[in-house]
Image (tube, rainbow, N blue to C red):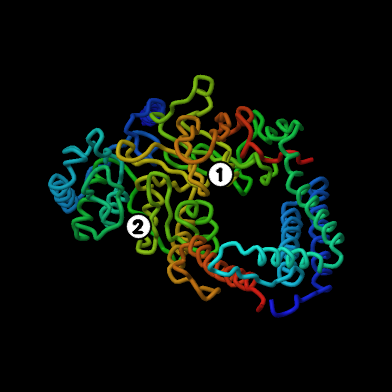
Amino acid sequence: MSRPPARSPRGELIVVCALLAAGAFSVAFVLLYAFDANTQLLAVSLGLAVGALALAGVVAGKWVVDQRKAVEARPRLVDEALEREVAGTIVQGAEGVSRRRLIVGAAAAAGAGVTAAAVAPLASLGPGDVSAQLKATPWRAGVTLVDDNGDPIGVDQLEVGSWLTAFPRGGDPRQLGASIVVVQVAEEYLDLPPERRDWAPRGIMAFSKICTHAGCAVALFRYPTYEPTSQRPALVCPCHYSTFDVGRSSKVVFGPAGRPLPQLPLRIEPDGTLVAAGDLSGAIGPAWWGVRRS
Amino acid sequence: MVLAVLLCSGGAIASLAARQADAQKGTSVDPVPAPPPTSAAQREEIARGRSLFLDACSSCHGDDARGLPGLAPSLHGAGAAAADFYLSTGRMPLANPTDEPTRAEPIYSRDEIDALAAYVASLGVGPPIPRVDPDAGRLNEGLAAFTLHCAGCHQVSARGGIVTGGVAPALQDATPTQIAAAVRVGPFLMPSFNENQISDAELNSIVRYVLSTRHPDDRGGWGIGHIGPIPEGMIAWLLAGTALLLVARLIGERNPV
């Protein structure tokens, strides 16, 4: 209490600027969210808003608010005179801040902006039927399966225990529903529901390669040499080890995925090439994928 | 003659439709009997392999190598590639049939492994021990093929990883023949790949790539064990965490009173 409190009009100015910037970045977040949901820009705007808020807090704490300490005398817990003095000092400290209303106003703007930014994404939970988008895939009955070079896939490329990645002929391989995993399992492992009995000719099955948990590429396939001492054939996602039992229509047997991989019914043409016998059996990828995307 | 061939292929198709429950990975039909040995030396080697087999392997695989239910698979049609791979990498014999076979010092000498492989090959037609020539492979083709087929489990640095139910081993100690045999055989939980999926030329490239991963030039200067993003992430967390602590300390410091 020996030194007079440091007054810093510049500090106050910085705080006001930072608070206004926080509000502006938050508004930018809301606008970006509404008009162009680019995740990088969304993250940058929200990050800058929170950063500006932090800057305002740091500067206000160090150079705007009075920094004096008051130490209570030890023997008596409450000294009324000292209490009054401290209260007086606090009031004085607050009075010492010039342009208080400006700072309070700027803080209100920042608070309103950041609150709006935090609440705006709730709109993602709102109405807007995206099921058609989620279910759209390039697969139809008769579409030929091709490899990454565009060559048709024949049954001779597969044998029991092998697997490969395939795409629709003529489709965009980058489309979410395009990439599929083709596996061949021994028929002893097939335990398909009645309506899918003829989806797996010779034990050859195809599933969407996009994991239903977080949308990773399902890149692992395990196939037992001797099942009684190991595990059933399964596709495994390398991100969180969701494990899909292929013989049971990719039922989830381990990991965080909530539902099976969509299955693609297959047919073998007379010349031995694999073609789709219909569309994928369900929505591709995690349930929230592509929501509200225009 | 033509009629005989037609009948044979008809039989093969029929057996394809009604596959036995113990169908081996990589085989598309039931095992075909192997041609009989042509020389006395071959006969003798097979007999020696058979006697080694009876001593150690038959307790799980059965006296006739047709497997025992719940313990071990049939070896008819497994081929010399599988026998050579499992024995030369020390994965067989297993102490306990429910253990995952992992790499160890081989129990048998080279001679004994050859005899056992000859015996298993005599049981039925299966993949032969592959011939590989890494020098004939192309490194860039190997990287592309390894990324497509192998890196999901073994990591692109060939340092291994896990799949639910098993460990995908690191490939640093495997010989070129063992790498190629594993691709064709598909040991334990690994899928198998035939010549139509990975050609012999592509396999040479893959082996060449795997050999190249043993001494990578670490352009960053710090390999961190080459086991991928996990140690890199941990290092980042430790460094970034320290920096964050310093920043927090600076922010929290009081002005002198």
Residue A76's place in the image compared with A168, above or below, is below
Q: Amino acid at mark 1?
A: Thr
Q: Residue at x 52, y 76 (%)?
A: B221
Chain letter, disc 1 residue: A
Q: Image quarter for residue A281?
A: top right
Q: Image quarter for residue B26?
A: top left
Residue B38's place in the image compared with A292, above or below, is below
Q: Amino acid at mark 2?
A: Gln
Same chain letter for marks 2 and 1: no
x, y (%) of residue A4? 75, 78
Which image quarter holds the N terminus of chain B?
A: top left
x, y (%) of residue B108? 19, 57
Q: Which residue is mark 2?
A: B178
Which image quarter holds the C terminus of chain B?
A: bottom right
Q: Nearer the viewer, residue B243 or A211?
A: B243
The span from disc 2 to disc 1 (Cα, nearest Å) is: 25 Å
Q: Secondary structure at mark 1?
A: strand
Q: Residue at x 71, y 36 (%)?
A: A125
Q: Residues within 10 Å of mark 2 (few under 14, many from 20)?
A: many
Q: Secondary structure at mark 2?
A: helix
Q: Report whether B206 appears left or right of B128.
A: right
Q: Residue at x 59, y 72 (%)?
A: B246
Q: Which residue is mark 1?
A: A165
Q: Image quarter for residue A129?
A: top right
x, y (%) of residue A293? 76, 41
Q: Nearer the viewer, residue B223 or A292?
A: A292
x, y (%) of residue A226? 32, 39
